[in-house]
Image (spheres, rainbow, N blue to C red):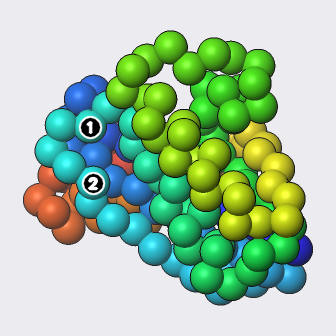
Amino acid sequence: MIYTNSDGGARGNPGPGAVAAIVREDGEIIIKSSAFIGERVTNNVAEYEGLIHALQLASKVTRGKITCFLDSELVVKQLLGEYKVRNPNILPLFLKVQELQENFESIKYKHVSREDHFQIIVDELLNDELDNKGYKRKFFRKK
């Protein structure tokens, strides 16, 4: 079984944004990746872009069953059909996720706390990406 953790965030809302994802198998991280996604990005757009990034990475290693962990309750509930997608800026991203799902035998989405060990890793990856682009942190996570 393959697991992903993804995150997306913006410094400001909107503001400069980045995404990060890890792909895990048998408890080991097999892929780590982050990317800058733009100057004026909302947090919700970034969360979707993070999941898209994770699905693209996972498709390189499996076409089987995957479980995707995200700290965005909104994204998870929209994907599970519990919330409607009302924002016209989100709809194309939602549809892109639907398209990418076709690459896998089955897919599960799980909401996870920001304090989850693997979620902390992707959060740090995306913050490092923004730091490296010159967008310095105003607040730091307590370790």
Q: Specify the quadrant that holds the N terminus.
A: bottom right
| Mark seen at residue 37 | 2
Check the image and name the residue furthest to the left. 134
Q: Residue at x 46, y 40 (%)?
A: 93
Instruction: Decide if residue 76 is in sight here.
Output: yes
Coordinates of residue 83 in the picture (x, y in percent): 68, 17
Q: Nearer the viewer, residue 50 or 56?
A: 56
- Dot 2 falls on a residue whose secondary structure is strand
Q: Residue at x 50, y 14 (%)?
A: 86
Q: Residue at x 39, y 21 (%)?
A: 88
Q: Are marks 1 and 2 in contact (CB under 8 Å)?
A: yes
Q: Residue at x 74, y 80 (%)?
A: 62
Examine the rendered structure and indicate whether residue 29 appears above or below residue 9: below
Coordinates of residue 68 in the picture (x, y in percent): 72, 55
Coordinates of residue 40 in the picture (x, y in percent): 18, 37
Disc 2 marks which amino acid? Ile
Disc 1 marks which amino acid? Val
Instruction: Decide if residue 51 is in sight here.
Output: no
Q: Nearer the viewer, residue 138 or 10?
A: 10
Coordinates of residue 123 in the picture (x, y in percent): 49, 55
Q: List the residue tagged with mark 1.
A: 41
